[in-house]
Image (cartoon, rainbow, N blue to C red):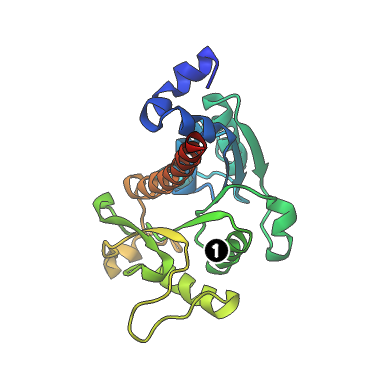
Amino acid sequence: MGTTTDKLRFGGIERVYGPTAAQAFTRLHVTIVGMGGVGSWAVESLARAGVGKLTLVDGDVSEESNTNRQCHAIQGNYGRWKAELMGERVKLINPDCEVKVITEVLEPDTMDAQLGTSDALIDAIDTLKAKAALIAWGHKNGIFTLTSGGGAGRCDPGKIHVADIAAVKADPLIGALRRELRAKYGFPQGSPKGKSQRFNIPAVYSTEPVRRLSAEDIARLPPGSGMGTVMTVTASFGLRLASLVLNEFAARANHAGSETSEE
């Protein structure tokens, strides 16, 4: 962070994490898959921390129905690719950030070519099979990989926690993901004693019981409306994921710096 612009925009990051970590952030490459209610806010956070390279992946366009929870969903943006919108936003926050936008659907057989390599991978999608394939790919390639549980039907950010996928409770999406990873990708099986071997994949999830509408309320909604969501929860998931990435690589940078100074 040598220029005046860097100091003005991201000096606060250096004063929190220290110069070694802040400089490391400028070299950090993070891939975020899913620009929805979780992923779009993770992108926002990483951009505002001065992260040097972001790969943004989403095959959907922004819609009015996204307005309650997604960063890009504002008047004038509806109908445009979510990943492109977030890429433009990142460049407004940090013109020096290198941004790669992917609007095509990821395929398990072509992820190497589509994604390339990165330091960290945030999974913020909610389709089970795609979620499992992405996590397995990141793990296999030695990328620091994180995932998000389900935020729909919840309204208390205070119930959000972080745990290894193997230890997550009260989240049906993570439970199904765990089974899929074990069945198809060779992740460690559960223990009969209840002490499952770690997957080494941090997950952000909520223990809040899902709020479900009454049958009468559901009948008044348009068909296919699904469960409700609120930004206070989904954005908190995204912020937590971003903070895990920043804290991990700050710790790595500071550790490497301390080893160098001792030599």
* x, y percent for residue 231: 36, 45
Asked if 126 appears above or below 182 in the picture, the reply is above
**Outermost bottom residue:** 192
Q: Which residue occupies 50% across, 41% down?
A: 256
At x 35% / y 77%, what residue is drawn?
195
Whether residue 184 is situated above or below residue 142 in the rendered picture: below
The quarter of the picture where residue 197 lies is bottom left
Which residue shows up at 62% across the image and 47% down it?
118
Asked if residue 169 lies left or right of residue 35, the reply is left
Left of 113 or right of it: where is 21? left
Q: What residue did someone put label 1 on?
A: 131
Task: Find residue 119 and report its horizontal and vertical position in percent.
Answer: 58, 47
Q: In the rendering, at what x and y percent does residue 196 appear? A: 39, 76
Of residues 38 and 72, the one nearer the viewer is: 38
Residue 72 in view in this figure: no
Q: Where is residue 70 in the image (x, y as percent from the top left)?
A: 45, 43
- Judge left or right: residue 32 versus residue 165: right
Q: Nearer the viewer, residue 24 or 158?
A: 24
Residue at the farthest front position:
263
- Dot 1 surroundings within 10 Å: few (below 14), some, or many (20 or more)? many
Q: Is mark 1 on a helix, strand or loop?
A: helix
